[in-house]
Amino acid sequence: LQVERTKLDVGDIWIPYEKQEGISGVCIERKTMNDFYSSISSNRLFDQLHAMMQQPAISILAVVGRLPIGINAKDVFIKNRIVGAMVSSILSFRVPVMRFDSDEELTDFINSLYKNCTFTGSKCRPLKFKKKPSEPDDILLSVLCSFPNVGIKKSESIIKKYGTLRKTFDATKDELRSVINEAVANSIIELMDYEYQGKSE
């Protein structure tokens, strides 16, 4: 199995598909369950699903793990939100969701998928993995996208307005509201003022 680490515009893993014209490959977006839930809250998930839907590829959303520690699995609201996002991924974006207990399970699935996507005996094109954000612009957007209800479009609007993260974090609530709506501005300010509650070791 050949692996190439490169910058992917969409998804985290790209497998070349050689057996059908019109399909360029298999695009896999990998998320831990914690990241999956966080991306629902920030709407980042739906931006990613929309981008996956636009390309001539088979797209898969792979979720690794179970509900994160600190979230009550019996909480009806949270469960409904997660299930609702999975249903939306399948019906609205045509991106099937697969859950894996571990990255080892996901790796086994990728290996099998790779063997079935390429012609036996031919020189296989390499499997591509997304690099972690390394370009400064990508890192800035990644930081802003981690805030609740801030997707890629809002992140770009904010950073274009203020230019740097320092200026962004120094902005007042009223100043942020000139770029984004009040609810999102409030959530950003509240999170920046939040005092860490984790237990020290």
Image: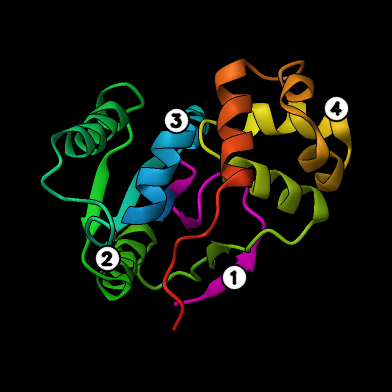
Tag 3 residue = 46
Question: Quarter of the image containing the C terminus?
Answer: bottom left
Over which residues does the magenta segment extend?
1-26
User: Picture coordinates of residue 61 (x, y %)?
Assistant: 35, 46
What is the secondary structure assignment of the residue under circle 2?
A: helix
Tag 1 residue = 4
Q: Is residue 181 magenta?
A: no
Tag 2 residue = 109
For residue 60, what is the image quadrant? Answer: top left
- Asked if marks 3 and 2 touch (Cβ < 8 Å), the reply is no
Hey, what amino acid is under mark 4? Lys
Hey, what amino acid is under mark 2? Phe
Q: Is residue 121 visible?
A: yes
Tag 4 residue = 161
- Closer to viewer: mark 3 or mark 2: 3
Q: Which comes sooner in the sequence, label 3 or label 2?
A: 3
- Closer to viewer: mark 4 or mark 1: 4
Horizontal relation, residue 176 to residue 98: left or right: right
